[in-house]
Amino acid sequence: MFFSVGVEMPANENEAYGMIVPALCNDDFGCVSAADSQEEIAEMVREAILLITDEMVKRGVDITRLKDAGPFVYAANPEYAYCEQWVMVDVDLSSLEGKPQRINISLPDVLIERIDNHVKQPASGCRDRSHFLAVAARHELTSKD
């Protein structure tokens, strides 16, 4: 899942970059982090996102329903005016959704070939056929709610 991340720039060399993930901030949770350099921003915020989403799962939150409004929406919100830059970070949350289970399904061979050809494209963002089917299922289930 892609998350919008607000970045507060350090005022001097003795301060760190501050980061906030608005999609994971509400009355019960907050997702913030810090990094000493620009190179560390993605790594540190991914760690913070995984930690807070893991805690959400432990408390019974359905993380498949998380929504990110996008950096333009958050940048326009006065609550995040201190964030001087916005970046998008992709974090794979699938490991937090539960234990993988093997299933046996039947699909038309042409459809399987189309799926496999799609997965082979770097822009697909899918690791393999199973990942593609999980993403498609999440999309379909979310769009119906």
Image: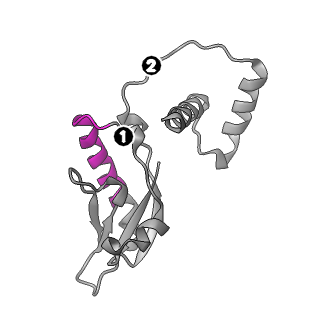
Model colouring = one colour
- What's the residue at 74%, 18% (across, down)? 108
User: In which quadrant of the rendered view does residue 33 lie?
Assistant: bottom left
Q: How many marks?
A: 2
Task: State the image coordinates of residue 39 (x, y, percent, origin top left).
Answer: 41, 69
Tell me which amino acid carries mark 2.
Gln
**Residue at position x 40%, y 61% from top?**
42
Q: Residue furthest right?
A: 110
- Which amino acid lies under the numbered mark 1 shown in the image of this protein? Ile
Q: Which segment did they paint magenta? A: 44-61
Q: Could you tell me residue 90's position as x and y percent?
A: 47, 53
Residue 62, percent from left and from top: 34, 36
Residue named by callout 2: 101
- 87 horizontally vs 52: left or right: right
Residue that lies at the very extreme toward the bottom in this rendered image = 12
Q: Earlier in the sequence, mark 2 or mark 1?
A: 1
Disc 2 and disc 1: Cα gap in Å?
19 Å
On the image, numbered disc 1 is attached to which residue?
63
Instruction: From the image, state whether disc 2 or disc 1 is nearer to you.
Output: 1
In the picture, the disc for residue 37 is: none
- When the figure is inspected, residue 45 is found, relative to residue 79, above or below; the finding is above
